[in-house]
Amino acid sequence: MKKSWSILLILVLLLFSMEIPALAKDIDLQAVLGNTAAEGKFDVYHWWTAGGEKEAVDSAIAAFNQRYPNIRVISNAIPGGAGGSMVMKVKVLALTGNSPETFQAHPGLELEPYEEAAMLYDLTELWETLSLEDRMLKGISELCQIDGKYYIVPIGVHKTNMVFYNKKMFEEYDINPPQEPVSWDDFWELCDELQAKLPADKFPIDLGDRKGWPATQVFESVMMGTSPQTYEDFINGVATIEQVTEVLENMKKLMGYVAPDHSARLWYEAAGRVVAGDYAMMVHGSWIQAFFTSQGWEYGKDYGAFAAPGTADTFGFCVDAFVVPNGSTGVENGLRWAAMIADQNLQTVFTNAKESVSPYRDVPEDIYDGLTLRFKSELLDDNTLVYPSFTHGTALPWQVSTDLHSRISDFATSSDPDPERYARMITQSIKEAGVKGEWNIVQD
């Protein structure tokens, strides 16, 4: 399996070395956006497949059709999450002349392979026309640029470094949730208590890392909780073996409390087992909220949440967004979609359904539930350390993140992994990839 994945990665990297010819096309943006009588159909490629996510993207399409009622939007879900499967899918489509009109991506370094292949339509005029920079929450606009030009439009923001738990299980087994901020000692004590009180067929934690990336996200949160300086050094390509070993030692201990068949499930299947009462907790991102809602769960009644151990006053930053390929046969519809996802009405219905934080300042706060409003407040708080996710495409090049998914997946599924050995492999891989970031997330 590992060999097959390596061969696939090599093939995809070769595809990215091939330049996709751009269509020479003069587009009157104002006329395109203003033509509400336009007809036709186009494809929206995204990775939202779980309960709650489908409802959210459907609400966005419905809002789009209120403006453009004669255009049929075809929703194409590419399972996988975290962007990896999407990168491979759309590149192949583009090279075969079937480029989608728009597809989901993350701002930051995930965009570089697309831009280097001359695949992305320059959206700078759209940003200026819609005053997106003025409407955007702080810290997002910069991630959407390459060499001063905009190539992507955000639709939602999620927090990555959270632990969600089944309140009824905690009550049933007489376990008190920890009080924030949660230290590593607090967390280990909680896990020990759960392990001691739960029946043999139930476990303190589940991952749902069949696709690999959820294990990397746990690694990411463990890294921030171990040392923010290590996190900064890691995404800048200068973390030492000793630093990464310390992170992996914490992760190895955490994995000792995880259901042994964790890699047999997708993340939302694991979340479903938390709902069913088989597993007590899940270290995951805030998009899990919409899934819980789709299962009839309510925050505060059925489930609770706390920042991952050691990560109080930090915010793992995951931004969902869309790009417009310049090689599709329907660039105009791609531009309409890119404009509409920033529309206040669409943002209102989508943000409410997705339970995400809107990237835009003018979306009313009364659409948020208590937990999401808390996340928005944290994001805007000057005392919060906001850090870019490397699992979700922002802080590391795509090929580096993909390789990391494979190594962390192997670590997470090994019965007794050697943290120092894996730390050596990971740091060597990042060094060989030439990662030289300039991130400055730790306050001096």
Image (cartoon, helix red, strand yellow):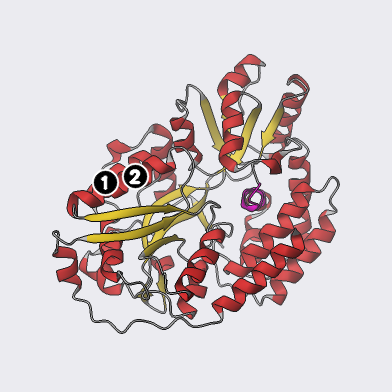
Q: Name the quadrant of the C terminus.
A: bottom right
Task: Judge whether residue 441 can be spotted in this image.
Answer: yes
Q: Is residue 322 left or right of residue 199?
A: left
Q: What is the quadrant of residue 371 in the picture?
A: top left
Which residue range is magenta in the image? 210-222
Residue at image location 27% in from the left, 58% down from the top: 135
Q: Is residue 59 left or right of residue 320?
A: left
Q: Name the quadrant of the N terminus.
A: bottom right
Question: How far is mark 1 from mark 2, CA to CA?
Answer: 6 Å
- Residue 58: mark: 2
Residue at image location 74% in from the left, 38% down from the top: 261
Helix, strand or loop for disc 1: helix
Above-or-below relation of 157 to 133: above
Which residue does the numbered mark 1 point to in the structure image?
Answer: 62
Amino acid type, mark 1: Ala
Q: Residues within 10 Å of mark 2 (few under 14, many from 20)?
A: some
Question: Where is residue 372 shown, x and y percent of the image?
Answer: 41, 39
